[in-house]
Amino acid sequence: MAQTANLMFRAVGFEEALQARTPDGVALSRTAARDLRRLYAALEAGVPRALQLDADEAVALVDAVGAIKEEPRQALLWAKVSQVLARHGQPALADILASKLRTLTDLEALAVVDAVERCELLAGDQGERLRTVGLLR
């Protein structure tokens, strides 16, 4: 049987939101665990099917998100990606990806960022990694 990870963290910046979702008599840790399960399920639903990327676009997206120094805000993901690509001499890809990313909801954009981060953690062929995380179909 697989061992369950025992995690510990402080609710810095989201304690009020966590308390607002926790019924009386229930530990905040149970609510946090439930909410993380929900979040990971939503992220596993993954990159929206409407985001159809070719190989060049998918690679550029991974490179651009990796180059964003601060935590990308989902609502502005399209703008940040566009800025990075334009600065790196890829204005055509910047425009294409901006138009595709601009239509995403915040949760869909978060799934894209999560997919990029998971892609970077995988070993092996880049095309296979992009397909594994749903950035390339």
Image (cartoon, helix red, strand yellow):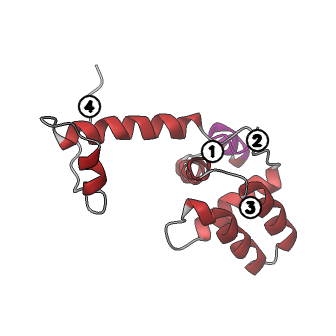
User: Tag 4 or tag 3, which sits nearer the N-term?
Assistant: 4
Residue 108 position within the rendered picture, expressed as x and y whole percent measured from the top left? 61, 47
Residue highlighted by disc 3: 60
Q: Nearer the viewer, mark 1 or mark 4?
A: 4
Q: Tell which residue pokes out farthest to the bottom in this image.
A: 87
Q: Tell which residue pokes out farthest to the top in this image.
A: 1
User: Tag 2 or tag 3, which sits nearer the N-term?
Assistant: 2
Q: Which residues are magenta?
A: 127-137
Residue highlighted by disc 4: 4
User: Tag 2 or tag 4, which sits nearer the N-term?
Assistant: 4
Magenta residue check for 135:
yes
Q: Residue at x 61, y 53 (%)?
A: 109
Residue type of the residue flagged with mark 2? Ala
Please rate how many residues cluster around mark 2, counting C-alpha atoms within 10 Å: few if below 14, some from 14 to 19, many from 20: few
Q: Nearer the viewer, mark 3 or mark 2?
A: 2
User: What's the CA distance linking mark 1 and mark 4?
Assistant: 27 Å
Q: In the structure shown, which secondary structural element does the residue marked by tag 4 occupy? A: loop
- Closer-to-camera residue (91/31): 31
